[in-house]
Amino acid sequence: MLYELEIAVNKLIHKLYPSASNIVIQFERPKSADMGDLSLSTAMVLAKQLKKSPRDIANEISTQLKLINEFDRVEIAGPGFLNFFLKHEVLTAFIQKILNNNESLYREYNEIPQSVYMEFVSANPTGPLHVGHGRSAVIGSALARILKKSNYSVHCDYYVNDAGTQIDTLACSVILRYVQSQTPELNYPTTCYQGEYITEIASELNTEILPQAVSSIVEHESKWSSLEDTEAQRTLITIIKSLIPDSTYKLIKERAVSYIIDLIRTDLDHINIHYDQWFLESDLIKNDAVKHCYTQLKANNTIYEKDGAQWFTSSQFNDEKDRVIIRSNHEHTYFFNDIAYHYQKYLKADKVINVIGSDHHGYGPRLEAAKNALGFKDKELIMRYCQFAILLRGKEKVSMSTRSGQYITLHQLIDEVGPGPTVFFYALKKPDQHLEFDIELAKKQSSDNPYYYVQYAHARICQLISKAQNVKSQEMTLLSHPTERQIMNQIYQFDTFISRASRDLSPHYVCFYLMDLAKLVHQYYNDVNILKDSDLKRLSARINLLECTKITLKEGLSLLGIEPKERM
C-alpha cells in the first residue's frame, strides 16, 4: 500500500540526511501519466537546508530508492523532481488483494490508538439549524468517520446549551406567542425569536399550563415595550418569571428545548449525522461538574475576586486577558460552564477536537488557557474552524437574516437538493476556506455537478458489472490499457488521501480523490468498449478492476456519509 511505501521512503531519506529537519515526505501525482505514477519534490526542499544542488540531492535519493522493490524505475526531471514508476505487478497484486478482502483498501496507521472526543455543530436549541450550521455538521461527522478508520477511538457530542439568557428568551417567546393567540392586540417584541416554530410550540400550550397568566402579561406589556435590545430582553424575562409559577415556567422551557432538539436531530438524521451523546449544559450543574472544576481551578491558584465577581487568570496562560467565570450576581458565565464541560472531556480522552464556526476564532486561546490551568497540558485541544457557506442560485447570492427569522433552514436545503449533494458540496472545500454553495449546480444532473459526476461513475460501474455476471476469471496481469493503469494507481493511492484527511482534519481530500477516480472511470468507459472484448480473460480482468473501483468509490462516499447509487 502506498502509505506503507511512503513511510519506507521517509525513513530512507531521513537516514540519508539525518541533519535535515521538518521535512515532510509526501508523494504527489505527476502532471501526466508518462511522467510516472508518483512524484517527490523533496530534493528542492532539502537543497536550502543542505546548501546543495537539488539535482545532486535527487540523484543521491534516487540511488537509494532504486533499492525499493516496488519501483520499476526512478527518474529525475526538471530542477530535481523525482518521478517513480511502480512495477505493474505491484498494482495488479494490490487490486487482487482488495477483491479478496475489502478491508485491504485501507488499514489503520495510528500505531498507538488514541481516544478522541469530538464536538461539532452544538447550535443553541433556540431554533432550527440553518444552512450555516450544515457545514460544520458535515465536516465534523466526516472527520469522525475518517478518524475511526485511522484507528482512533472517537466519541461525538452535541453540546446542548439549555441554560442561560437565550433559553429564557426562548421560553418567553413561546409564552408571548401563546398570549398573543388569546389576545391578538399584544405586540410581539423584536427581541424575541421570530420563526414560525415558536408559534407551533405555543400552540401546544393551554390554559391549564398558563392559568390566569394571560391578562397579567398583557397588563405589563408597556414595561418592556418602551425599552430596547438587551434591557428590554432582561426586563421581559424578569416580568414573565414573576407572573408564572416556577414549575410552569420550567415546564414550558423544557418543552421548547425538547421540541427544537427533535427538529435538529431529525434534520441531521437526514444527512446521516449521528451523535454518541446529546450533552445538556444543565447537567453540568446537576452532577456537580462545575463545582469540581471550580475546586480544581481554585486549588491551582487560578481564580481571584474583583468587583464582586470571580475571575479566571487566563492571561497567565497566553490568553489576551483574564476572564469572568462567575458574575457579581452569582450567575455562571457561558465560558465557565464550557470550561467544566471540557474538564469532563479531558478526563475521558487523549485528544479533544471542536469543529466550530470561524466567528469564534478568539475562543480557542481561552479554552487552551483553561485546559492548562486545570492541569491537562499533556492533552491536545484542536479547534477546527469552519468558514461560512454562502448560498447561491446560479450567480445570485441568497440573502439571509437570522434575527428576523427569514433564513433558509438546513431542512429546506436538504429538501430541495437532496441529502447526498448537500453533504458533498459542504465537504468540497478545505474547512478554513470560504464555500460558495450553488443550489442550482447541486441539483444539476450533468458532469458540471461533482456529486453527480462521482455517483454516475459508481452507477455506471454497477450497470457494466450486472451485464457481465458470468465472467469469473481473475487474471489481473492482462490489464495493460493506459487508463487501466491510471485507475489502479489511483486506487493504490486511496490510503494516502485518507491519512492526509485524518492528519489535516479536512475531508475535502476525499471529495477530490473521488472526483479524480470518477474522471478516470468515465474516461475508461469512453476509451474502451469493455463488454465487447472478445478476449474473455481480459474482459474478466476488466470487470474485476471495475469491481475494485466500485469498492473504492463506495468506501470514499461512505466516509462522507453518502449512500452510493446503483442507478442514476
Image (cartoon, rainbow, N blue to C red):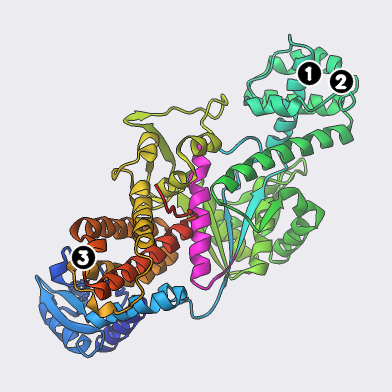
**Disc 1 + disc 2, Cβ < 8 Å:** yes
- At label 2, the amino acid type is Ala
Residue at position x 23%, y 77% in the image: 478
Q: Earlier in the sequence, mark 1 or mark 3?
A: 1
Secondary structure of the residue carrying tag 3 is: helix
- At label 1, the amino acid type is Val
Distance CA(mark 1)–CA(mark 2): 8 Å
Secondary structure of the residue carrying tag 2 is: loop
| In-image side of 144 versus 259 (left or right) | left
Establish if 508 lies above or below 418.
below
Point out the frontmost of discs 2 and 3.
3
Magenta stretch: give its range.
131-154
- Quadrant of the frame with the N terminus: bottom left
- The residue wearing badge 3 is 483
As for residue 441 lying within the magenta part, the answer is no
Dot 3: few (<14), some (14–19), or many (≥20) neighbours within 10 Å?
some
Distance CA(mark 1)–CA(mark 3): 69 Å
- The residue wearing badge 1 is 179
Q: In this rendering, does residue 234 appear at all?
A: no
- The residue wearing badge 2 is 213
